Image (cartoon, rainbow, N blue to C red):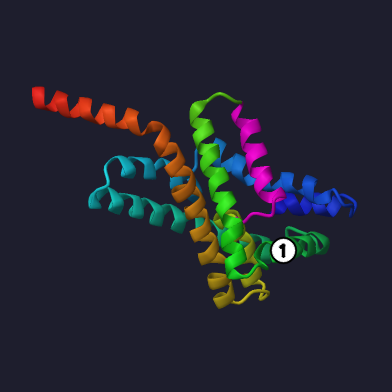
Amino acid sequence: MIAEAVFATHLPDVTWLPLVESLGYTFGFLIVIMGRMQLFTENTLTTVLPLFARPTWFNLTCVARLWGIVLGGNIIGCFLAAAFIAFMPTFGPEMLDNITEISIHATENDAWSAFGKAVPAGLLIAALVWMLAAGEMDNFLLIIVMTWLIAAGGFTHIIAGSVEMAFLMLTGELGLIRGVFSFFIPVLLGNIFGGTVVFALITWGQVREEVNDASDSGKRSNTSD
C-alpha cells in the first residue's frame, strides 16, 4: 500500500497511472514470498493437495489449524502495519491522502462483488505457487507479473486488502461491521474458492495418478516390511 501511494504521489494523474501504480502492489508479495514467510493464500493449494490424497478428519483438522494460525498471524501483522501508517509521523499529508484513497477503492465493493473479485486473486496466487514449485521461470519476474495482474485487474486479496481495511478502521473511515461482512469474510471465501475449489481441483487432476501410485508403493513397502 505504501509503494502504491508513492507512485500515486509522484506521478501525474493520467489514464495509465493505475497500471504503473499497481507495480507497488507487488512489493509486499516479493518480501513475503522471496523472504520465505507464510502467506495465507499460498496455503490454499499446497496444504489442500495432501488432503485430497488422504481425505481424513485428522488431515482436515491439520489444514484448518494451519489456516487459522497463518491467517491470524497475517491479520495481526496487517493491523500493526496499518497502525504504524496511521499514527506514526512517517508520511506527509499527500501520502496519507493517497493511502486513504487507495484503501477506500480496495474496500468499497458490496459483499457479492468483493467475493467475485476475490476468486481470480485466489486462483492467481495458487497458480503462482504452482509455477514457483515448477522452477521453470525466474521467481522475481514471475511474482511481479502475477501479483501485478491482481492489482491491475482490480481483484481483491484478503491479506493485502486487510492492511487497507485496517487502516480505514483505525482512522474512522470504515466501520467494524461493514469491514467484516462487506470485505473480510467475502474476500476470504472468494480467495479460498479460487485457490482451493478451482485451481487445486485442476492441479489435483494432473497429479492424482502420481500421488496414488506413490501411495500404493508406500503401502506395499510397509506390507513387505
Which element carries disc 1, helix, strand or loop? helix
From the viewer's perspective, tell me whether residue 58 is left or right of residue 83.
left
Q: Considering depth in this image, is 222 or 141 the residue closer to the camera?
A: 222
Which residue lies at the image location 67% right of the left edge and 65% below the top edge? Answer: 86
| Magenta run includes residue 208 | no
**Residue 167 placement (x, y as % from top left):** 64, 65
Which residue lies at the image location 17% right of the left edge and 29% below the top edge? Answer: 219
Residue type, mark 1 in image: His
Quadrant of the rendered structure where residue 103 is? bottom right
Q: Is residue 166 above or below residue 178?
A: above
Q: Considering depth in this image, is 57 or 38 the residue closer to the camera?
A: 57
Q: Which residues are magenta?
A: 138-156
Q: Is residue 39 visible?
A: no
**Residue 44 placement (x, y as % from top left):** 45, 48
Quadrant of the rendered structure where residue 176 is? bottom right
Q: Residues within 10 Å of mark 1 (few under 14, many from 20)?
A: few
| Magenta run includes residue 152 | yes
Q: Main secondary structure of the magenta part?
A: helix
**Residue 220 placement (x, y as % from top left):** 15, 25
